[in-house]
Image (spheres, helix red, strand yellow):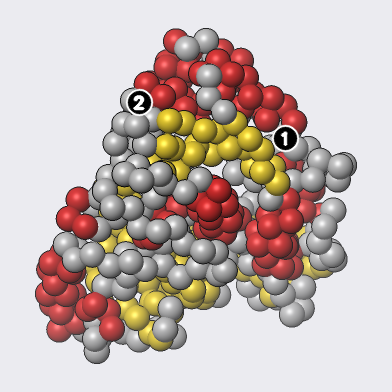
């Protein structure tokens, strides 16, 4: 059980929050990374004439980013990352087609482009970990992992080491993410994208400040509708019509995700049980379910929803009705926490806590929450109201206004009736 807090602590929270705002003006470089060499810190902000290496996927967002950067006077180079081996017929990657689209946009804009192979890195640092997590019964977020380890890890490192800045110039790394970088007051902050419906700062929350110091997000201030208009205006009709990628490029539609994973995961079927351990049906393998989703169990007249997984006994725990209390929780613990700009100093003090805006998934309105440190990289997060379907393995991410401070991986969830 998580510790209860008293009124004195919440007064302390407000005090610490004001301290935090003061701290925000101090430069800090943080964000742990596995094994990548971090880019050197630039001496100034981006300015026309600088080189920009733009990660291009063949989609509309990175293509329009190329157009905008070129128009703004940057020397742009496109880089396409191949991250799935298309010879593996289990995948449905469109890698070759995407690279042709990148080449065609680069030809039109008269900018160079190249392809880099990261299939091994992607497999080891993202896909294998994703499979391991599913096998452990948790629901990972490979997109967050991919941004940390691949796009703003291995790819950023490769791009920076292959294109050192010429004297007086700086080299930057850009992507088509909907997020913004603020470099005022000596701190590099990750901010939400201005288009709230597209903001991708959630997915970028595990990347550290030093990586962001070299990053540009040309679309962060634009609504998606405007980006599509710009693409059409520049004759990119066929790219606008392409289906949006879902992060894991090779998986096609999310609906088939469980079928796709089933080819790589050994997770046998087993019993689906109610809260009293009565068997109500069969599940196809625990990996195929996430907390809060419909369980596809036909038992009685109610619809059943997934409330938990008992991995040791291979049981799927289900509850009747979409509003069942066991589907809701307002408290969780998180591990492997990353503060993009360093840990706010007040959290390391006795009973130190912060009140911030938090999300436990990408598509969720943020909710006020109190963060308390429990041990190194471990935090307690308590939301002011309950959230349905919090899943361990997913990321809890926190913001102070538009400023994304970081987040951690959800470890335990304090569900009252489970
Ligand atoms: N295979 C890839 N090679 C290089 N960069 C990539 C690749 N896939 C994604 N990116 C970069 O990451 C950004 C975000 O990708 P994501 O798939 O999350 O979003 P998206 O909105 O579908 O982007 P896009 O429209 O550019 O495909 C892209 O805009 C691009 O800059």
- Mark 2 crowdedness (10 Å alpha carbons): few <14, some 14-19, many ≥20: few
Where residue 238 appears, x then y in whole percent?
Answer: 61, 15
* Residue nearest the observer in this picture, 243 or 158: 158
Mark 1 close to ligand 1, CB under 8 Å: yes
Q: Position of residue 284 (x, y in %)?
A: 81, 58
Q: In the picture, residue 149 is in which quadrant?
A: bottom right
- Rounded to the nearest whole Å, what is the CA distance between mark 1 and mark 2? 29 Å
**Sequence-wise, which precedes: disc 1 or disc 2?**
2
Asked if 85 appears above or below 73 in the picture, the reply is below
- Closest to the observer: 1 or 317? 1
Q: Is residue 199 left or right of residue 412?
A: left
Is 137 or 105 nearer to us in this picture?
A: 105
The residue under the point 49% across, 39% down is 53
SS for dot 2: loop
In the rendered structure, the answer to whether residue 227 lies left or right of residue 269 reads left
Residue at 15%, 84% in the rendered image: 8
Residue receiving disc 2: 73
Q: Is residue 292 left or right of residue 325?
A: right
Q: Label 1, on which residue?
A: 95
């Amino acid at each position: 059980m998580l510790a209860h807090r008293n009124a004195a602590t919440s007064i302390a929270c407000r005090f610490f929050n004001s301290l935090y705002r003061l701290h925000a003006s101090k430069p800090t470089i943080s964000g742990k990374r596995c094994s990548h060499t971090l880019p050197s810190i630039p001496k100034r902000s981006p300015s026309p004439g600088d080189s920009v290496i733009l990660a291009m996927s063949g989609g509309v967002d990175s293509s329009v980013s190329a157009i905008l950067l070129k128009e703004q006077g940057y020397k742009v180079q496109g880089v396409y990352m191949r991250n799935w081996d298309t010879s593996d017929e289990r995948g449905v990657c469109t890698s070759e087609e995407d690279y042709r689209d990148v080449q065609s946009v680069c030809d039109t804009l008269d900018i160079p482009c190249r392809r880099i192979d990261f299939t091994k890195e992607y497999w080891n640092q993202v896909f294998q970990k994703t499979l391991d997590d599913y096998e452990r019964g948790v629901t990972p977020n490979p997109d967050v992992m991919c941004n940390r380890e691949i796009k703003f890890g291995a790819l950023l490192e490769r791009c920076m080491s292959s294109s050192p800045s010429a004297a007086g110039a700086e080299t930057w790394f850009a992507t088509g993410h909907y997020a913004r970088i603020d470099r005022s007051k000596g701190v590099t902050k990750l901010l939400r994208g201005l288009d709230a419906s597209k903001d991708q700062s959630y997915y970028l929350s595990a990347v550290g400040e030093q990586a962001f110091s070299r990053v540009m997000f040309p679309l962060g201030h634009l609504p998606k509708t405007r980006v599509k208009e710009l693409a059409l205006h520049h004759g990119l009709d066929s790219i606008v019509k392409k289906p949006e990628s879902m992060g894991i490029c090779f998986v096609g539609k999310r609906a088939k995700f469980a079928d796709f994973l089933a080819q790589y995961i050994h997770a046998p079927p087993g019993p689906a049980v109610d809260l009293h351990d009565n068997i109500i049906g069969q599940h196809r393998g625990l990996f195929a379910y996430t907390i809060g989703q419909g369980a596809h169990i036909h038992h009685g007249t109610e619809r059943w929803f997934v409330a938990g997984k008992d991995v040791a006994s291979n049981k799927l725990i289900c509850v009747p009705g979409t509003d069942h209390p066991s589907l809701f929780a307002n408290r969780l613990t998180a591990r492997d926490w990353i503060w993009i700009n360093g840990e706010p100093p007040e959290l390391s003090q006795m009973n130190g806590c912060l009140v911030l805006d938090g999300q436990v998934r990408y598509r969720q309105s943020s909710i006020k929450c109190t963060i308390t440190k429990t041990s190194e990289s471990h935090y307690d997060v308590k939301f002011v109201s309950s959230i349905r379907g919090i899943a361990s393995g997913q990321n809890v991410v926190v913001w102070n206004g538009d400023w994304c401070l970081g987040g951690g991986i959800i470890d335990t969830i304090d569900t009252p009736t489970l």
